[in-house]
Structure formats: C-alpha cells, structure tokens
Amino acid sequence: MQCSGMWAVAAALVICLMRVHTEPLVAENTHLLTSEKHKIVLNQGMKDPPRDCFGMLMVSGGQARDGVYLIQPDEYPILAYCAMQEGGWTVVQHITVNGTVDFDRTWVEYKQGFGTLTGDHWLGNEHLHHLTRGPGRYRLGIKLVDEDGVTKTGEYDPVMVEDERSGFRLRLGLFQGSALDALTQDTENYLHDNQRFTTKDRDNDNYFQNCAKLEFQGVAGGGWWYDACAGANLNRRNVIYWQKDCNKEHLCKYAWMMVKPSDTVKVVHTGDCKKDEL
Ligand SMILES: [Ca+2]
C-alpha cells in the first residue's frame, strides 16, 4: 500500500463509523423513530442498557446529555427520550397543543406507543407498566408550559401503572409542585388515581358513554385514565387540560409526563423478624 499510515487509519475509522451507523437498531419500539433518525440514539450498540434514563445518567457519571437512548425496563430494549439536564427523567408523554401527532388512538396504539420520540409522543402503556413496577418506587413528573412560557411542575410519589389485564390502572401517591394536583384531588369531582385506562375502542371509564370519544371543537379526548370524565387530560390535541393551570381560558402550549426512581426508597430489611418483636 502506498498511502500513508495516517490515511489508512482515517479510512479505517470512516469504515468503522459507517458500520456502526448501518448496524440495525434493536429495540421493541423503533416505530417511534424514523429510520433516518436511528443514528441519533446516543447509546446505540450498548450492551445491557440500564432500565431507565436515570440509570443511564448514573452510568455516564452525570455526563449524559438530553436525547434518545436505549433503555431496558423489561426483557427487550426500548427507545426513550431522556431529560438528563432535569435529572434523568424518562419521558413517557409529550404533547404540543395543535401539533401534528394524532392522540385519538386505539388501545393497541396506546399500549405500544405512537408519535415521534424527538417530538410529540406516547411512550406506551406497556412500557409505562414495566418502568413503574420497579424494582423500587417510581415517581411521576408533570411539566406544563403556558402560552407566556410560564412553567409549572408537579410530582406524584410513588406512581405505578398496573398491567394490561388490570386495564393499565393508575396508582398515585402524594403530590407536590407548583401546579395544582389534578389527578388525586376531586375539586372537579373527578378522580384519575385508581382509574383504568380508556381509549376510543375500550371503555373502562365511569361515564355512560366513552369519555375518549367526547369531542371538543371536533377533537376527541384521546386515551386517558378517565373517571366520568376528566379534571385533567393531557392527551387532547387542541386543549391541554390540567384543571386551573391549563384549560380553554388559560391555554398551555406544551406538556410532558416523565418517570424517575423515587429518592425516598425505603430500605426493607428482609432479615428474620421474630413475631414477638412486632
Ligand atoms: Ca363509559
């Protein structure tokens, strides 16, 4: 070979990079990313990815940046958007009011996820179940941004989404935040905590009709943990609804739902405990 050593190294590097980029992406939910965007997955090719974004942030020594990562909350890896700068949250929902992603979807679509991870999406109830069932407690983060750019946040600790057999029932703990609690308080006589999920093709709500089919200005409510029907619904495309924080009069532009391990995991001692000590 006549070419210099430096060029040979450069050529080998290019070939190597091309190989990395042409390797097929192995994840259960690649439909949430167009094939051109597979190369944006920041930990592509990582063996045994962490179970969530917080784990990925820890593995990176706190250096990981915001973006799409492979995580593995269950048997197979999935892709998820990680809000690393905010502390390693796994984003499970993002909506832009009047965005292009349709949230009026079927049970199977809500189960498997839809939209685009880099934009508006629903990660999928099955993945939400796998993430929040632990091990360890998880908390749910809500982030709302109104038309003036004012951000309100809230957290439920713990959160658990039950399995499909239980209708992906939502279980929430205590709330704190700058937003109002719109899921476990009944100021509007609707409770979302402990409700099963409802979609336009599966009515698990407490209303005589299907809440997911009720329209406002021609747009259906989308899938949600409806009561009869809602004091909050982040899946209606034309009105992000969160009681007094986001509604028809006070418009919000963006919403996010995210999960993260709880900081306050209680250590359970599994050692023998004599009955007379109880
Ligand atoms: Ca009903």
Image (tube, rainbow, N blue to C red):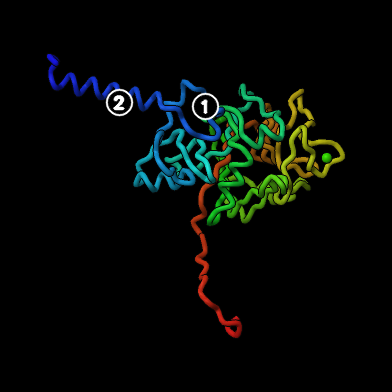
Quadrant into which the N terminus falls = top left
Image quarter of residue 142:
top right
The x and y percentages for residue 266 are 52, 64
For marks 2 and 1, the one nearer the N-term is 2
Secondary structure category for the residue under label 1: loop
Mark 2 lies on a secondary structure that is helix
Say which residue appears at 36% left-offset and 44% top-offset.
Answer: 60
With respect to residue 222, does 262 lie above or below? below
Q: Residue at x 53, y 55 (%)?
A: 135
Residue in view at x 46 percent, y 43 percent: 53
* Residue at the disc numbered 1: 33
Neighbourhood count class around disc 1 (C-alpha, 10 Å): few under 14, some 14–19, many 20 upward? many
Residue at the extreme front: 1
Which one is in front, 54 or 96? 54
Residue 231 seen in the figure: no
Q: Is residue 60 visible?
A: yes
Ligand 1 resides in the quarter of the picture at top right
- The answer to whether 60 appears left or right of 262 in the picture is left
Could you tell me which residue is drawn at 35 percent across and 25 percent down? 19
Quadrant that contains the C terminus = bottom right
* Near-viewer residue (159 or 110): 110
The vertical placement of 29 against 260, above or below, is above
In this rendering, which labeled residue sits more in front, label 2 or label 1? 2
Please provide percent x and percent y for residue 127: 58, 42
Which residue lies under the disc numbered 2?
16
Amino acid at pointer 1: Leu
